[in-house]
Amino acid sequence: MPPRKNYSDEFKNQVIIECHETGNASLVARKHNIHVNTVNNWLKLFRQTGSVTKSIEDVDNGDLKEQLYQVSQENDRLKRLIAEKELKISIMEDLMKKGNPRMPTKSR
């Protein structure tokens, strides 16, 4: 299988304009040495969204979901850490307000 080519958005727009001008997607595809199915996919995407650029919904959601899960886990961990630190600070402030009470000595 040949490597996948990434075409710029400007190039895709130019191909779409040429397809609209000529009315023949296969002729434009041959001119630019692109498979006609690729050009037809660009045309379909353009008709649906008004643009050839991929929207966020078109991106592979598996990777995004995994990243979101990892970020959520890290966020939860950091929230717990902050809560613990705030509790320690609160305890220390309370102790400082009370001063340094002396422990009663035991008489023997």
Image (spheres, rainbow, N blue to C red):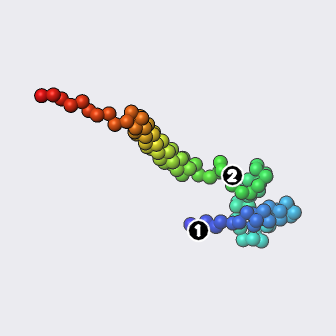
Residue drawn at point x = 65 percent, y = 48 percent: 57
Q: Is residue 36 visible?
A: no
Residue drawn at point x = 78 percent, y = 62 percent: 13
Q: Which mark is residue 3?
A: 1
Q: Position of residue 72 (x, y in %)?
A: 51, 44
Residue drawn at point x = 83 percent, y = 62 percent: 17
Cα–Cα span, label 2 and label 1: 23 Å
Residue drawn at point x = 74 percent, y = 57 percent: 52
Foreground: 30 or 87?
87
Q: Residue furthest top?
A: 107
Left or right of 102? Residue 77 is right
Foreground: 18 or 23?
18
Is residue 96 depicted above or below 108 in this figure? below
Q: Residues within 10 Å of mark 1 (few under 14, many from 20)?
A: few
Q: Which residue is under mark 2? A: 55
Quarter of the rendering containing residue 96:
top left
Quarter of the rendering containing residue 93:
top left
Q: Position of residue 61 (x, y in %)?
A: 58, 48
